[in-house]
Image: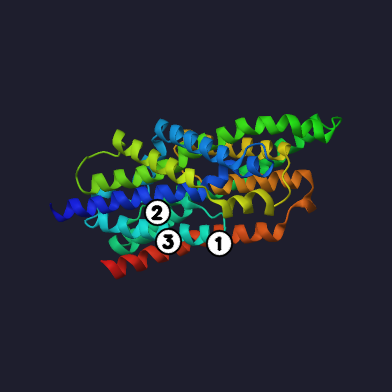
């Protein structure tokens, strides 16, 4: 068994491990609101999220090609596999740290930042496709703003439509609707987030010359979808608590508005082949919905902590991957 093949296997294992961790790290994105309002029991919500994540992950590959080819050209890296190992280790470490502390940070930011940092250190400044990297960053930064605005608008419209109805009647109806929006949110999460591991594995296959294009093989799709679904089935309870209860007291109508807003942003990004952070989308949508409900109802201190984690994730992941590459290779 040659060295190249062994390193390739290490990259695949780490990529699937990242996808698995992404699954339980980001489970909260899809089900936090429905669990906090008791629209779904926790175990039912997690099972549904796992199934919908799996289905979503199988149906699209555009984001995978963006992840695999926009930051760097795998055919121009002599040590591409080693760079990917440093990338994945850094992203996994940051995901585990933020999961442990219950911070809903972005797996997408961690992966993109780590990849850029590892390519910069391992390949040099000129090996980073700064134009492609900037395009991805723009999408990651703009999507939370759109999700916030959409959440605010949707909640404002719902408040106006149901102003004359009793809160009990409204929330009873929306508690049922939340089951559908949680399923939709889980599906869109799979269409975007699972593709990031697919893109890394395909990047590795091209680097190792096992294939010549960024087309995602079927076995990569199935493997990544399965890893994310299994991770989702574990659940990320600490982040679920933060998302579902610590930003503001979410009622079923709020959860419905937040889930619809976030799912719309994520799926729109998937259709345009842009990787976005499902964590940022749903958190921003919750903040927008809370602001529309009552600005003072939002715990802005908690929101500020979350925003800080957004800002620092990319640079920390980039530095961490660069250090890991330097130490290991």
Instruction: Say if residue 143 shows up in the picture.
Output: no
Q: Which SS class for mark 1?
A: loop
Instruction: Please give the residue where the numbered disc 3 appears in the rendered image.
Output: 93
**Which residue lies at the image location 51% right of the left edge and 52% below the top edge?**
106
Residue 221 location in percent, x, y? Answer: 35, 36
Query: Which colouring convention does the figure follow?
Result: rainbow
Instruction: Please give the residue where the numbered disc 1 appears in the rendered image.
Output: 101
Instruction: Please give the residue where the numbered disc 2 appears in the rendered image.
Output: 130
Nearer-N-terminus badge (2/1): 1
Contact? badges 3 and 1 (CB < 8 Å) = no
Q: Which SS class for mark 3?
A: helix
* Disc nearest the viewer among 3 and 1: 1
* Disc nearest the viewer among 2 and 1: 1
96 left or right, relative to 123: right
Q: Is residue 263 above or below residue 279?
A: above
329 left or right, relative to 114: left
Contact? badges 2 and 1 (CB < 8 Å) = no
Nearer-N-terminus badge (2/3): 3
* Disc nearest the viewer among 2 and 3: 3
Q: Is residue 40 above or below residue 24?
A: above
**Which residue lies at the image location 41% right of the left edge and 66% below the top edge?**
319
**Which residue lies at the image location 56% right of the left edge and 60% below the top edge?**
309
Give the position of the C terminus as an image quadrant: bottom left
């Amino acid at each position: 068994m040659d060295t190249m093949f062994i390193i390739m296997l290490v990259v695949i294992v780490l990529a699937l491990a990242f996808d698995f961790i992404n699954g339980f790290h980001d489970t909260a994105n899809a089900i936090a609101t429905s669990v906090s309002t008791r629209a779904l029991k926790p175990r039912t919500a997690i099972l549904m999220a796992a199934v919908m994540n799996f289905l979503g992950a199988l149906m699209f590959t555009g984001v995978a090609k963006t992840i695999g080819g926009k930051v760097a050209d795998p055919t121009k890296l002599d040590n591409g596999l080693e760079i990917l190992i440093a990338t994945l280790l850094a992203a996994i470490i940051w995901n585990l740290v933020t999961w442990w502390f219950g911070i809903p940070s972005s797996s997408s930011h961690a992966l993109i930042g780590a990849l850029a940092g590892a390519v910069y250190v391992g390949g040099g400044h000129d090996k980073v496709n700064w134009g492609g990297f900037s395009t991805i960053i723009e999408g990651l930064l703009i999507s939370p703003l759109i999700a916030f605005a959409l959440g605010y608008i949707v909640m404002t419209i719902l408040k106006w439509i149901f102003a004359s109805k009793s809160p009990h009647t409204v929330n009873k109806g929306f508690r049922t609707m939340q089951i559908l929006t949680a399923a939709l949110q889980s599906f869109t999460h799979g269409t975007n987030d699972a593709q990031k591991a697919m893109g890394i594995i395909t990047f590795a296959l091209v680097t190792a010359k096992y294939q010549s294009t960024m087309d995602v093989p079927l076995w990569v799709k199935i493997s990544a979808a399965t890893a994310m679904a299994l991770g989702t089935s574990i659940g990320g309870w600490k982040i679920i608590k933060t998302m579902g209860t610590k930003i503001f007291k979410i009622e079923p109508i709020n959860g419905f508005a937040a889930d619809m807003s976030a799912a719309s942003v994520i799926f729109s990004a998937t259709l345009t082949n842009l990787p976005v952070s499902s964590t940022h989308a749903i958190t921003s949508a919750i903040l927008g919905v809370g602001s529309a409900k009552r600005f003072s109802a939002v715990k802005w201190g908690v929101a500020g902590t979350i925003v800080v984690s957004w800002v620092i994730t990319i640079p920390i992941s980039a530095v961490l991957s660069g250090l890991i590459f330097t130490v290991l290779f």
